[in-house]
Image (spheres, rainbow, N blue to C red):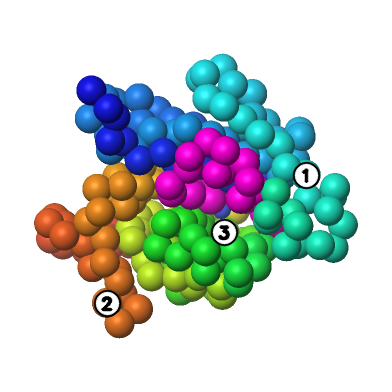
Amino acid sequence: MVSTRKRVGVLISGRGSNMAALIAAAREPSYPAEIALVVANRRDAAGLRHATQAGIATAVVEHTAYGADRDAFERAIDAVLAAHGIALICLAGFMRRLTPGFAARWEGRMINIHPSLLPAFKGLDTHERALAAGVRIHGASVHFVVPELDSGPIIAQAAVSVRDDDTADALAARVLAAEHRIYPLALRLLAEDRLRVVDGRCVIDGAVFSEGALVAPDGAH
Ligand code: GRF
């Protein structure tokens, strides 16, 4: 039988824990996508080793080899994606800004995970900024990639409560666990063609939403 699973390329720059979560989810035979390639822009990206051990093809496209020529860097990425027949891209801690041209070529087929409840705290150092702002609820988002940073239609979010004694590291660890839940979920929805963007919002065919709110602090203890 010919596999109908969508071939996914995951782009990383470092640790690759979200990549690992996607790989683990895609091991399930009924999962609608397969992680067919991991691309890193750094040779020392720790996630590369995990991908190799999982039997997944890897490629290194070093941005430093292209100097300031972002188009040439992205053409090199496109070439390796094409060589592996990649249909969908997951950015997972990929620390290079992509050009509007690349975003346009992959519009509707490229998603990213960001460690905040977007549109709050776009950019870097989200956990430090959430603590400084004093928010009670923080979290993670998976969204379609558009040219503007951290701004595309939101596919899935997870919330965590912020504790009075939190540190950025402790908060990051709880958010990361939430990231590992929602990224495979969002990729599943994309690979099953269940996502539509209507007036800038993502609409999900057959979505199930739980009732109730995460309240923080919770209860009068
Ligand atoms: C994650 O927090 C992700 O949301 C952000 O970069 C981090 C990557 O972590 N975009 P990892 O490499 O997936 O472990």
Q: Residues within 10 Å of mark 2 (few under 14, many from 20)?
A: few
| Residue drawn at the location 49% of the way across and 60% of the way down | 106
Quadrant where the C terminus sits is: bottom left
Quickly name the residue at label 2: 198
Please give the residue where the numbered disc 1 appears in the rendered image.
62
Label 1 CB, ligand 1: below 8 Å? Answer: no
Question: Residue 133's quadrant in the figure?
Answer: bottom right
Q: Nearer the viewer, mark 1 or mark 3?
A: 1
Residue 163 location (% of width, % of height) = 45, 55
Q: Residues within 10 Å of mark 3 (few under 14, many from 20)?
A: many
Q: CA distance from mark 2 to mark 3?
A: 30 Å
Residue 159, percent across and down? 36, 57
The picture places residue 158, in percent across and down from the top left corner, at 35, 55
Whichever of callouts 1 and 3 sits on the residue coming sooner in the sequence is 1
**On the picture, is 97 further left or further right than 136?**
right
* Residue 73 position by quadrant: bottom right
Q: Which residues are magenta?
A: 77-96
- Looking at the rendered image, the disc whose residue lies closer to the viewer, 2 or 3, is 2
- The disc, 1 or 2, on the residue closer to the chain's N-terminal end is 1
Looking at the rendered image, the quarter that the N terminus falls into is top left
Q: CA distance from mark 1 to mark 2?
A: 36 Å
- Taking the magenta stretch, the answer to whether it contains residue 94 is yes
Residue shown at 16%/60% (left/top)?
A: 205
Q: Amino acid at mark 2?
A: Val
